């Protein structure tokens, strides 16, 4: 349905509401999903008119998220996102006239105090959750620092939801991460070590799938999970190349990576997955197209086709990624020294007459960032 302009109180016009209401009654519909943002007032009015439960895009994504979250961090993040969402929708919780309107036609009234009390309760809960999540994030940072000391490059799998990241992850690592043909099967980052053909050991990280128009409170809630992408030495952008909207999905993923602050200096490989699903001619055309570009690989995580070429490309992208160098720093270069320690790049350190001699193991990317300090 195309709307020229959403109606302020009911989203749809009265004629369309009556027409849809009739169809819902005929078909025994109990749940209505609207692919877009519905205001709390619109939601309340439509539910009352149609006698159904109504969810907008954010509400549906939250329902799916709460069903999928498995780890402590995932559960906390979903709870935070849900509370932020509910806070804006308290108006619809009140069905008695007095509490909706504020009572006796005046602004305010007893209902206001109830809604304010609920808001305060939600704010307190959000503060408590943020504190708990901060502890989880701190633990993750410590794990990341520990990994940096064992200098395995991190390879992050990113992509639109249901692109096949977890299938690829399982195939590469021999793990048994949940794989299902459904949205957001993965909500919590999973990490495993992988040995590449050239002997290089890497840590492969599976992340939450992206989706277009992801509501802001969800992006904020899942930032901690997606921080694994920020720490990555190589990003594998996994695409379901057989999906009708694959180009649009790829643009959405790139836009979210940019919003997260993933620099253009992080090497990326584009993985055209599910090649086994394409018809003979289309599959061949995709293989030829991918072969023309060094950073694109056509694979099937399900059958294993093209994975050896992918591992070779990963090895090439990371080859010489970590190198050992000795740096001489003066006593006045404390900021640079602190940065090297913070990133976990220092292997040995000794004090000299003029400052510090540090043995560092780092990548070209770290080197260029260090030069800018």
Image (tube, rainbow, N blue to C red):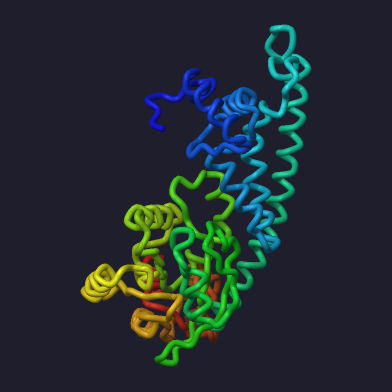
The residue drawn where x is 41% and y is 69% is: 235
- The residue lying furthest to the top in this view is 105
Which residue is nearer to you in this view: 310 or 47?
A: 47
- Residue 163 in the image: state x and y as whole percent: 44, 63
Establish if 2 lies above or below 266.
above
Left or right relative to 21: residue 77: right
Left or right relative to 91: residue 317: left
Instruction: State whether residue 267 appears in this view.
Output: no
The residue drawn where x is 47% and y is 79% is: 153
Establish if 72 lies above or below 8.
below
The residue drawn where x is 47% and y is 56% is: 210
The residue drawn where x is 35% and y is 54% is: 245
How many discs appear? 0
Left or right relative to 283: residue 156: right
Q: Quadrant of residue 191?
A: bottom right
Which residue is nearer to you in this view: 214 or 363?
A: 214
Q: Quadrant of residue 261?
A: bottom left
- Residue 192 in the image: state x and y as whole percent: 56, 79
Which residue is nearer to you in this view: 116 or 32?
A: 32
Q: Quadrant of the N terminus?
A: top left
- Residue 73 in the image: state x and y as whole percent: 67, 60
- Residue 86 in the image: state x and y as whole percent: 66, 37
Q: Quadrant of the C terminus?
A: bottom left
Instruction: State whether residue 158 appears in this view.
Output: yes
């Amino acid at each position: 349905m195309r709307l020229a302009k959403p109606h302020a109180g009911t989203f749809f016009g009265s004629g369309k509401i009556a027409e849809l209401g009739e169809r819902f009654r005929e078909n025994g519909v109990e749940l209505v999903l609207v692919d877009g943002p519905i205001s709390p007032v619109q939601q309340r009015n439509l539910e009352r008119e149609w006698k159904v439960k109504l969810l907008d895009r954010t509400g549906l994504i939250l329902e799916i998220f709460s069903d999928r979250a498995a780890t402590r961090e995932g559960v906390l993040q979903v709870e935070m996102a849900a509370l932020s969402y509910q806070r804006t929708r308290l108006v619809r919780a009140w069905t008695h006239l007095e509490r909706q309107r504020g009572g006796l036609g005046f602004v305010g009234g007893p209902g206001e105090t109830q809604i304010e009390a609920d808001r305060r309760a939600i704010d307190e809960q959000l503060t408590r959750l943020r504190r708990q999540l901060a502890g989880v994030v701190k633990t993750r940072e410590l794990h990341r620092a520990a990994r940096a000391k064992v200098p395995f490059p991190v390879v992050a799998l990113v992509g639109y939801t249901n692109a096949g990241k977890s299938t690829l992850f399982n195939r590469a690592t021999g793990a048994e991460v949940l794989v299902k043909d459904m949205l957001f099967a993965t909500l919590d980052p999973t990490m495993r070590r992988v040995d590449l053909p050239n002997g290089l050991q890497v840590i492969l990280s599976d992340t939450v799938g992206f989706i277009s128009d992801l509501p802001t409170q969800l992006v904020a809630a899942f930032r901690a999970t997606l921080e694994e992408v920020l720490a990555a030495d190589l990003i594998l952008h996994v695409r379901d190349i057989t999906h009708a909207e694959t180009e649009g999905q790829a643009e959405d993923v790139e836009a979210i990576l940019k919003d997260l602050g993933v620099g253009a200096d992080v090497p990326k490989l584009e993985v055209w997955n599910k090649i086994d699903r394409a018809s003979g001619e289309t599959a061949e055309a995709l293989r030829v197209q991918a072969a023309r570009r060094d950073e694109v690989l056509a694979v099937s995580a399900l059958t294993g086709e093209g994975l050896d070429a992918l591992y070779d490309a990963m090895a090439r992208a990371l080859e010489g990624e970590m190198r050992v160098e000795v740096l001489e720093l003066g006593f006045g270069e404390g900021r640079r020294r602190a940065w090297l320690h913070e990133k976990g790049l220092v292997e040995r350190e000794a004090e000299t007459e003029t400052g510090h001699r540090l043995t560092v193991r780092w990548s070209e990317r770290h080197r260029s960032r260090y030069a800018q300090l």
